[in-house]
Each structure stands twice: as structure tokens, then as C-alpha cells.
Image: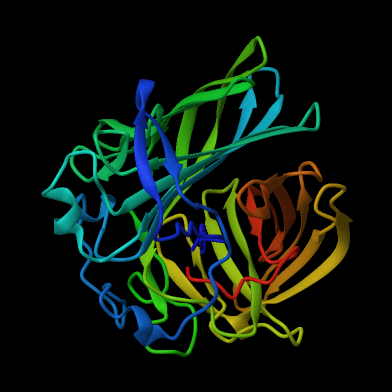
Amino acid sequence: MKKLSILAFLLVLTASITFTLLPQSKVTATGKASVEWLEAQPVESESSFSRVYEPQEMLFPRDLGSHDDYQTEWWYYTGNLESDSGRPFGFQLTIFRRALTPDTAVFNESSSWRSNQVYFAHFTVSDVEEESFYFKERFSRGAAGLAGAKASPYQVWLEDWSATEIAPGQVQLVAKTDDVALNVTLQETFPPILQGDRGYSVKGPEPGNASIYYSIIQQQTEGTVTVGEETYAVTGLTWKDHEYSTSSLSPGTLGWDWFSLQFDQGTALMLYVLRKEDGTIAPSSAGNFISREGEVIPLKSDDWQLEVLDTWKSPTSKGEYPSQWKLSIPQLDLTLTGKPMMANQELNLSTTYWEGAVEFQGQQQEQSVQAKGYVEMTGYTKGLDTVL
């Protein structure tokens, strides 16, 4: 889900917004505009958007692209990289799409500059050796080539931040800020992994409270990371999540913890834990373990035990996040302990959440295993009764 990857926040633009075109394709707004938490609403209240009620047939490359009839969608890339000298880096490049209304035709037929689709993106680099965390956010309309997504050839972009297919099974990620830059090429080693029940990922007991969710894991990655004036040749692994839905976290859900781990022996693990106000875990929490051969082993909330061993308090938001875990999955004979590769990987943007590079180690079937990956933690500074 990143991803769940699920969206920890949503863009809400008031009805009084009027977009004005500025030089160099910049967009501003006159009238009252804000980025706010969106309170949970009954599933039926937005029935004009498509919803997910059951598994759907997924076709590729078609489903690499956008699904504008659903209200929310994201393409989520996270990776763990090292320079030639072993200097570790993490990165996140996520592009989100949010539909303001379900009626696409009304916008698209009148002007190429008008759109009911808003795109926004997050780009981060974790420089672990220096314990420096860089993060940036952008917004744009899904019109006039400023932002968008297409299936074939695959591309998703927001201005010059992009994921672009350059050859079959190869995607180039590019993003740059004043402080850092990323330019890497990903090579697929697995076909898309359908999360949940054949891509049907349930988020709550309410009808239609679900998403379509797939991952592309263990992508061999090489390219460059730039920090300041120094550019490093890097290699490593990247994880991609793509998810779309029109759904809400169930009332009483504070937020989620999402884990994506890529093991050194070629396996992978995804878990999302939905945390409730009473301290329990929602039954719809779930995950998958993927074997070296691509076999997907589904995991339900009672199939694992996750213990928080330590916490870290943000000096910025004052939120207190888990900073060390013990994870046991008996049916896989897998026990792991893990922690962030650096403590402060909190994004303070239009919303505040923690997402960063982690490392885990442990035992599976009496063999030592190691993994690197990413963890996303939301709802530690404010509850997330929000649309996904």
C-alpha cells in the first residue's frame, strides 16, 4: 500500500480557487486555497467515483498508467543505494494524483489548461553517513504537460521529476532540488507483484473500502546521487508501489506503519499495520512475502507479531515514532530485528510523516538473513481519519 504506501495526507482545494497561469509554467491561486486534513466520510458520499469491491483483472502495461475515475492514486519509489566506497543513501520519489471531481470531460474539453486532476510529489534523499535528510514537495495541475501519467510507453511526471520507461523493463528516475539530485536506472527482475487478493487490498470492513495495489520489487538500480557539489556513482535496489482507490481509513484509525524489505537472498516482504485509537491493530492489516521464485505468500494481521523496542522523538514536530522493531512471522520461521539507518527521516511538508531507509537482520529457517528497505509511519503527530 505505500505506499498503503497509502496516502497520509490529501490535497483539499476550496471551491473558490481560480488557477492563474504565470511565466515559466508556474501556477498560483487566487481566492482561498489550503492544504488540510480531509475528514473521513461515509463510503456512499463519493459514489460517483469508481470504487474497489472485489479483485479486478489487471493488465500490463495498461495498469501502469493513471486511473482517473478513482479519486486517489500514487506511484511510489523507494530505494537503498551505496556508492563505490560503500557510502549508503536512501531515496523516495513519489508522485500522487488527486481528482477534484469525477467529471473529467467537463474540464478536458474546454481548455488544455483546465483539469480536475491535481498532482503533487515528494522527493527525499537520506545521506546516512552525514545523517542529513533532504526533502521537497511540489504541486501542479494535470494539464498542459505539467504533470501526468501514461501507460505505454510508461511515464509519470511532475515537471522535471519523473519516472520514464527507457527500454522494456527499464525505468529512469530523475529528480533534482537545489541541494540534491537523483538520476538512476531501474531494471525489473520480477513481474508486478499483486498485493492482497490478486491486487484487491482491503483497508477496512466497509464495502468499497479497498484499493488496487501492486508492487515491483528487487529492481536492480544504478546511476548517480548528488549531494551539494559532490556526485556519487551508486548501485542498489528499488521498490515500486502503485495504488489507486476511492476509500477511507475506518473511523478510529490513527494511522499506519508500512514496511517494505528486500532481502539479500532475493526475497521480499511487505506489511502494513493499521493502528487504532484503543491501541489495537485493525484486522484489515495485511502483507505478503515473496519468494525468490516469485511465489506470493499472503499474511493476515494475526500471522505476525511486531514489537516496538525503542522510540525517537522529533525535535520539529514533537511526534514520537518507533525507532527499533522486533518482527516474528512463525509460518515463515522468520524473526527479524531492525532500525532506521538514521533517526531523523521525518518529512515536514503539507503534512508530517516519517519515511526512511531501514535495515533488518535475523534468522529464517536457521539461516542468517539481512534486508534493507523503507518504513513509512503516519498519524504520530495527528490522527489520520482521512481519505486514502
Quarter of the image for residue 196 reads bottom left
Residue toward you, 132 or 115 = 115
Does residue 60 appear left or right of residue 90 in this picture? Answer: left
Q: By what rule are the colours in the image chosen?
A: rainbow
Tell me which residue sits at (26%, 59%) in the image.
67
Q: Which percent across, then down, holds residue 329?
A: 66, 74
**Would residue 126 appear left or right of 79 to someone viewing this image?**
right
* Residue displayed at 14% across by 57% down: 105
Residue 190 higher or lower than 28, as above or below = below
Residue 156 visible in image: yes
**Residue 47 location (% of width, % of height):** 29, 80
Answer above or below: position of 331 versus 68: below
Q: Quadrant of residue 271?
A: bottom right
Taking 84 as reference, is 159 above or below it?
below
Residue lying at the far left of the rendered structure: 109
The answer to whether residue 191 is visible is no
Q: In the displayed structure, would residue 53 be above or below residue 117?
A: below
Which residue is at the far front?
31
Residue at x-position 47% and y-position 68%: 388
Q: How many marks?
A: 0
**Relative image position of residue 371 (x, y in whole percent):** 65, 49
Nearer to me, 373 or 121 = 121
The outermost residue toward the top is 229
Q: Nearer the viewer, residue 182 or 329?
A: 182
Q: Which percent across, then down, holds residue 343? A: 81, 45
Q: Residue at x 55, y 27 (%)?
A: 235
Give whichever of 138, 176 is nearer the camera. Answer: 138
